[in-house]
Image (spheres, rainbow, N blue to C red):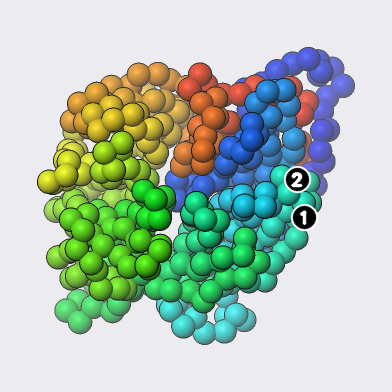
Amino acid sequence: MHFSALNLPAADDPTDQVDYFANNGFGNAVAIVQQPAGEHHNGVTYVAYQGPLEDPYVAAYHHETGEWQGPFKAGESVMGKAPDRPKPIDNHGKPALVIDDEGYLHLAFGGHGGMPHHGKNPLGNIHYGEMRHVVSKRPLDISSWELLDNVSVFGTYNQWVKMDNGDLYLFYRHGAHRSDWVYQKSTDNGRTFAPPVSFLKHRRRSDVAAVDSWYPWVGRGEGDDIIVVYDYHLCWDVDSGRRGHGHTTERRNAYYMVMDTKSGVWRNVQGETLSMPIVKDYADEKTLAVTTGDLLWTFNGAAKLDPASHPHFTTSIGPMDWSKFGGSKLTTHFRWTGQEWSGNLATGMPRGGGDMLISSSEDVRIFLGGRDAGNDGSVAIWRSKDGGDSFIREKVLLHRPGSGMAISSMIKNAHPDARVIAAEIPSGTDYRRMYLIGDNGPIPRAKRAASVLVRVE
Ligand code: ZN
């Protein structure tokens, strides 16, 4: 197949506006975990997403002028080029974006654990792809990019954190699903990185035929702190005799911890120093926030501090559905009160993914993307005014009947008009309309400019 830009029917009215900014999102074009996917900087919101052939694309919106730039293809992914693979769209290598102190934009993308030709992964197993790091050739210019060969090819679920002193941390899983989670630190705006440091350890269990594994979400805390919320993946061996599929069968609980980047020392929510890297029994003893019991399917959301510096996080929890990969789960919210973790499974929120806007420990808004109660794709603000005991749907920002919806974490330093990126997932195509959504809904764009991709048969 071939693609051409701006190839529209002649009858198209050039003044037509649409509520999406591009139509070349691809697969699961954005997600909560590959983050941040966008950053607001000096009046411009920069956004990244997975486009055709799983390559990373970047667009920019100027809030004062209302002008859009891009999307531009920012790099080349190893994945997405082999339609004969059992799972032709891998989706694990979506881009995460960060702007360094000199204004250069960085993307990490393209990995799902590395491939045999990369050699042995010293921190776990391999699967596919090659994590890559590209940087814009000029500050705050998304039109041209260069590849830097300075991060691990084994990475996946790439997440950036930038500290106030300009230090960049790239967090990721160092391999496929039976691998350590690590970070690499750069003190020179991403030109060089220290070697990977493990903070969550994968480990074969001695009691059952399975491996301990993890799924974290990483973000800024107070001052020099980085906060991490994570769930536990009990990865059964395929021949273990367990019902269902080995890898997808169990994800449990929620855990929380903090790294002081000044000292490199980790602590739990009570302030106790932790021995690193974390292993399962120790996590249960020191960092457990929520026990999910008989509910064997969890999926991480995001974490954030409230004005009292107490952590909140979202996570999806539900029963495992043995008939398909994954489970049916509902979005939940938990917070630390200063004494204990507070939250419940009956928030009223449907399944989906969502990051938070926290005004106070009591007042929490979740920008939730997914399928609503009517099974339509939606992005909505769910608000709690009682510290997360209950939520009501305050405002629907986008509603697409019959489609699914994927959503990003909060854009870093977000402008109120541009909080999250969403991808509309219609049935019958792998291409997605991409939306930049704020408190009043999506930001419009001229239809001609947003029609980046027209499939030419
Ligand atoms: Zn697994």
Task: Name the residue: 64% across, 35% down.
Answer: 42
Give whichever of 101, 298 is nearer the camera.
101
From the viewer's perspective, tell me whether residue 378 is left or right of residue 85: left
From the viewer's perspective, tell me whether residue 197 is left or right of residue 41: left
Residue 52 locus on image (x, y percent):
68, 48
Task: Name the residue: 28% across, 27% down.
Answer: 363
Residue 372 locus on image (x, y percent):
37, 28
Residue 382 locus on image (x, y percent):
34, 26
Count of numbered labels shown in the rendering:
2
Q: Which mark is residue 137?
A: 1
Task: Name the residue: 68% across, 39% down.
Answer: 59
Residue 142 visible (yes or no)? no
The residue to which callout 2 is attached is 141
From the viewer's perspective, tell me whether residue 128 is left or right of residue 314: right
Classify mark 2: helix, strand or loop: strand
The amino acid type of the residue labelled 2 equals Asp
The amino acid type of the residue labelled 1 equals Lys
**Label pair 2/1, CB-CB below 8 angstroms:** yes
